[in-house]
Image (cartoon, rainbow, N blue to C red):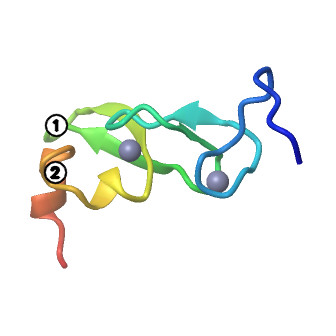
Amino acid sequence: MSEDPNSKNCKICEGKAFTTCSGCGIIICAKCSRFELIGSGCGWPAYYCPTCVQDPCVKPNAMLRDS
Ligand SMILES: [Zn+2]
Ligand SMILES: [Zn+2]
């Protein structure tokens, strides 16, 4: 239950760390990460947390999605 500075866990569900959000930089697990391609056409891959993936300010492509 105590915080271990050496263990980096998902900031959302405390799961196993997988990557960091490209938007806000928090640690996220594979389950909480959202894979997106940045840019149009042949964009580059990035992972976002569930918050940033819905934020058009962070991820411009969000506004191109159907709501
Ligand atoms: Zn998680
Ligand atoms: Zn984020």
Task: Give how far across and how far down residue 50 sits, in percent.
Answer: 43, 58
Residue 2: image quadrant is: top right
Residue positioned 82% across, 29% down in the render: 4
Task: Read off the residue under disc 1.
Answer: 39
Q: Secondary structure at mark 2?
A: helix
Q: Is residue 36 above or below residue 63?
A: above
Residue positioned 64% across, 47% down in the render: 30
The amino acid marked with disc number 2 is Asn
Q: Is residue 45 above or below residue 61?
A: above
Residue 18: image quadrant is: top right
The amino acid marked with disc number 1 is Gly
Apparent side of residue 64 relative to residue 32 in the rendered image (left or right): left
Image quarter where the C terminus lies is bottom left
Of callouts 1 and 2, which one flags the residue occurring earlier in the amino acid sequence? Answer: 1
The dot on residue 24 is: none
Residue positioned 27% across, 61% down in the render: 54
Apparent side of residue 43 relative to residue 17 in the rendered image (left or right): left
Q: Is residue 34 above or below residue 5?
A: below
The dot on residue 61 is: 2
Is there a contact, CB below 8 Å, between mark 1 and mark 2? yes
